[in-house]
Image: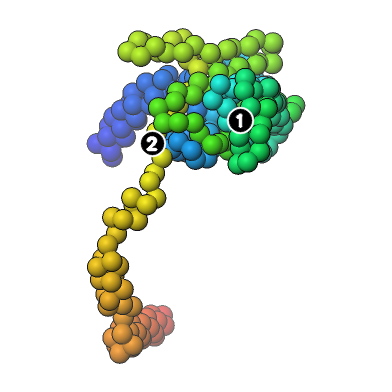
Amino acid sequence: MRSLARLGATAAVTLALAVIPVSAASAHVRVVPEQTAAGGWTVLTFRVPNESETAATSQVTVDLPTDTPLLSVSTRPVPGWTATVETAPLPEPVDFYGTELTEAPSRVVWTAQPGAEIADGQFQEFKVSAGPLPDAGTRLVLPAHQTYTDGTVVDWVDVAEEGAEEPAHPAPELTTTEGADEHAVADEVSVEEVAAVSAAPPTTPEPDTLARVLGGVGLALGAVALVIALLGRRRRGDA
């Protein structure tokens, strides 16, 4: 028992040491994209931890780029929060599937209802569906503003320079990547490979084999039931 206690204590200390750096490094407003392929749509998850010991987070605002606009933005409902997508004029009109757009989503504002704020030691995730993503290699900076119940506003707007240390209040960001070439993927699968898969024998057991397996299982269960019955009779006789 002492060995087990020492082992448990060691494991707890090790886990604590492993968790502390991760928690400290994650204490920023961050964005986690579902995918970053240029030309496609993605789900952006904004992870917002509360960093105040005396106040709760009551509002989160994310600024969207207008120089490389995300022409379609929709929010996922968060219980206890309302979301508003605001628009702004574009520097130049953009063709969106045959429609000329002169404005695009410029920011998203989430506001907590009373009792739904993000308290000390908690975090919340806010999701938006956005697209189409701009050309590959485009750096999308998404500044965020975190408002607390005591009136304090923390602006996550600092842009990290390449090779430099992370700033105190880094802005959430992502970089788009090359889109998948559907024709290239299709060409990698040859006709011979398709034919080989089609001609492969089925993996479902043949009826005869399946019957033998089920019969064996039935005999085993019957034997177990018989042993249980004999033991029950013996116990009643001894009583």
Q: For the point 69% across and 10% down, which residue is it?
A: 151
Location of the N terminus (image quadrant): top left
Q: For the point 43% across and 37% down, which residue is it?
A: 37
Q: Position of residue 162 (x, y in %)?
A: 35, 14
Using the rendered view, name the quadrant where residue 90 is placed: top right
Label 1: few (<14), some (14–19) or many (≥20) C-alpha neighbours in 10 Å: some
> Quick one: SS at disc 2?
loop
Q: Which mark is residue 163?
A: none
Q: Is residue 54 above or below residue 34?
A: above
Residue bearing the label numbered 2:
178
**Marks 1 and 2, how far apart at CA:** 21 Å
Would residue 43 be found to the left or right of residue 1 on screen? right
Q: Position of residue 192 (x, y in %)?
A: 24, 68
Q: Is residue 165 above or below residue 175?
A: above
Q: Position of residue 40 (x, y in %)?
A: 49, 40
Residue bearing the label numbered 1:
94
